[in-house]
Amino acid sequence: MKLNDLVGEFRIALTNEENEVLESMSQVAPLVSYREREQQVIQNLIRKSLVTKVIRDGECLVVRND
């Protein structure tokens, strides 16, 4: 039996602030384009696998996982 069979819907707990930042991310953007507090929240979202960090040409880019 698979976990998905046991659990109807798998949800990751988010704070209100994390949810706001996640919803505001609509496209690939440099991490430095966000304010310092938003960067900390984005780092938390990266740890929760809701955002992906990509290094391209020495620049750190972030994108929302859908």
Image (tube, rainbow, N blue to C red):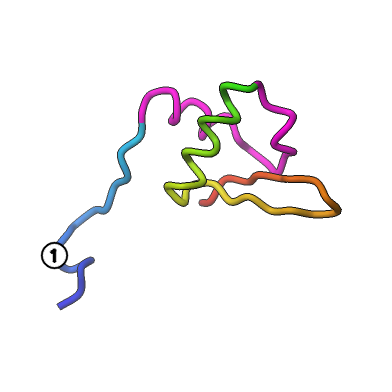
Q: Residue at x 36, y 28 (%)?
A: 15
Amino acid type of the residue that numbered disc 1 sits on in the rendered structure: Leu
Provide residue 12's location: percent of width, then percent of height: 32, 45
Residue 56 placement: quadrant: bottom right
Between 19 and 32, the residue placed more toward the observer is 32
The answer to whether residue 31 is above or below residue 9 is above
Drawn side of residue 39 relative to residue 44, left or right:
right
Which span of residues is magenta-colored? 15-35
Between 31 and 63, the residue placed more toward the observer is 31
Drawn side of residue 62 relative to residue 42, left or right:
right
Q: Residue at x 27, y 53 (%)?
A: 10
Q: Does 27 appear in magenta?
A: yes
Q: Which residue is mark 1?
A: 6
The answer to whether residue 40 is above or below residue 61 is above
How dense is the environment of label 1, judged by Cα within 10 Å: few (below 14), some, or many (20 and up)?
A: few
Drawn side of residue 32 relative to residue 36, left or right:
right
Provide residue 37's location: percent of width, then percent of height: 57, 21
Q: Residue at x 44, y 23 (%)?
A: 17
Q: Does 54 appear in magenta?
A: no
Q: Residue at x 29, y 47 (%)?
A: 11
Q: Does dot 1 land on a helix, a strand or a loop?
A: helix
